[in-house]
Image (spheres, coloured by chain):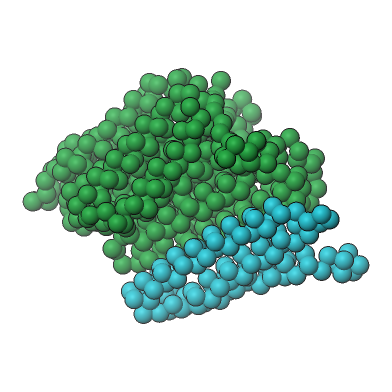
Amino acid sequence: MAHWIPVLIAIPIAGAVLAPVLPHRLVHLWGLLVLAVTTGIAVVLTLATPLSYEMGGWPAPYGIELLFDPLSGFSVVVAFITLLALASSLGASGPLASREGVAVILLGAGGMAGFLVAGDFFTLFVFLEIFSLAAYGMVAMSEERGAGLAAFRYLLMGASASIVILLSVGLIHTLTGSLNLADVGARLPEGGLPLHLAMAGFTAGFLVKAAAFPLHVWLPDAHATAPSPVSAILSGLVVKMGIVGLIRTPTADDLFLWIGGASLLAGALLALVQSDAKRILAYSTVANIGLIVVGLSVEWSGAVIHMVNHAVAKAALFLAAGAFIHQAGSRLLDGVGRQMPLTTVAFALAAISVVGIPPTGGFTGKWLIAVGALEAGHVSLVVILVFSSVVLAFCYGRLLDRLLFAPPRAGIGEAPVSMLVPIVLLALLSVGLGFAGRPLVSLLGGP
Amino acid sequence: VTVLAGNLDYVATVLLFVIGVWTLIADPNLIKKVMGLNIMETAVFAFIVTTGVLDPPSPIPHALVLTGIVVAVSTTAVALALLLRVHREFGTLDVNELRDLW
């Protein structure tokens, strides 16, 4: 069974390498096929956790170890959301239907899968760079003016973060003489400057990748200018890899409460002053990442469950926003809602889930984290959590109000089926996951 | 002073890193920012290679740096490709001229 772990990484990456040489008409179907197979392998592996695989037969502390633990099960979400995002552009002529587009998206999925199963620090770094480079490329796929600059800013911050992470990996190796995650955990010294430096490096580096508040400045431009299916991948999946990094490495976790709280508050307030739909969604991601970072400190299972629920709901929201923009032909969405009832209902369901109204998926994680914060005695944090939820609910409500009750525009029809199916599926899933809270927690390794 | 003199190689990597960070933050030219990024990377590589200078020497840091260099080259290539597009769209690579967009 364990030998399927390297296959999980190899299939999307090999698919990405082959995509540029395939005939133009077939490349989109090729991408969907590769991602469907990847999703299948990820599901099979998740049901068989925990597993570990030694590359080339070299035993663990010295060889490269791949492990599939409950957290690696997030690779199911990665492959499935990437599949739906790619499917939503089926039949369209945009950049995602091109050979380069499919290649970059498959590379991103393979990189994230590798990152999730990496068992040592250096493999973690290599896959971090693979999906990061793919993500810069995905932003630049947009034909919008300024997308190149947004991608470049993302690259400058992302690459700086990667360098700091590499420095920390070097420090960890010097300190312990090992790179294996479990082995290093057992050998870490009690304290000292080098260890603190390494912990600070991992914390700062992965917080940039996750786009937590003071380090989020690259996110709004990158996520708002990228093509909408790419925004779904970036906001739903790529920023979550920063959180996975924070879980996997030794970090300064006493800072998480502060950074998470600040991110929660700032994300919600900054969303309030935006008028563009995709920018509101981008800042809502900053707020939700804050919630997850808080959760890492007070209630681990809440954080992980919110990672999954937010990924599903935010992907639905971005795909729906993309459908509105596609049908309206512009970023001005006033009054398009009534001509696109199905998309609007799906958008509203996913928004309810992100805001965290029971019984939807988003509520489960928020509730677990709020209870965890209360039990740890952080009442102010619960106040921030409730306040930012109310602010975000207002932002989404205002967006829906503009969609539905502005004077209707003529000549706009419902989104094509290829867009509608992924949106409705993800929206229903984001609500439905609320009823699967307990199995999801146990699947992801919680109590 | 003796501590600094005894670890001259580490002092050099820290200096190099600071130069890189400064170039990345302070220089208005986007290409020079990429160069600053490269200097930071070189500093980290030099640091990691230095940690392998033991008796007997440890080969692992060298292997790490080799992979790191490959990653750094790819990042630089993507960065320069993006700058080509920025230059085509805006006709400049100067942060002061890009103003609101930066």
Tell me where residue B65 appears, x and y as whole percent: 64, 59
Chain in cyan? B
Please name the residue shown 29% across and 63% down the image: A144
- From the viewer's perspective, is A103 left or right of A339? right
Please name the residue shown 8% across and 51% down the image: A411
Q: What hue represents chain A?
A: green
Please name the residue shown 36% across and 80% down the image: B91
Looking at this view, name the residue that lies furthest to the right: B2
Q: Is residue A167 above or below residue A315?
A: below
Tell me where residue A308 appears, x and y as whole percent: 43, 34
Please name the residue shown 68% across and 58% down the image: B62
User: Is residue A324 in sight in this rendering?
Assistant: no
Splitting the image into 4 quarters, where does residue A120 fall? top right
Q: Is residue A397 above or below residue B44?
A: above
Q: Is residue A202 above or below residue B22?
A: above
User: Is residue A124 in sight in this rendering?
Assistant: yes
- From the viewer's perspective, is B23 left or right of A8? right
The quadrant the C terminus of chain A occupies is top right
Splitting the image into 4 quarters, where does residue A109 fall? top left
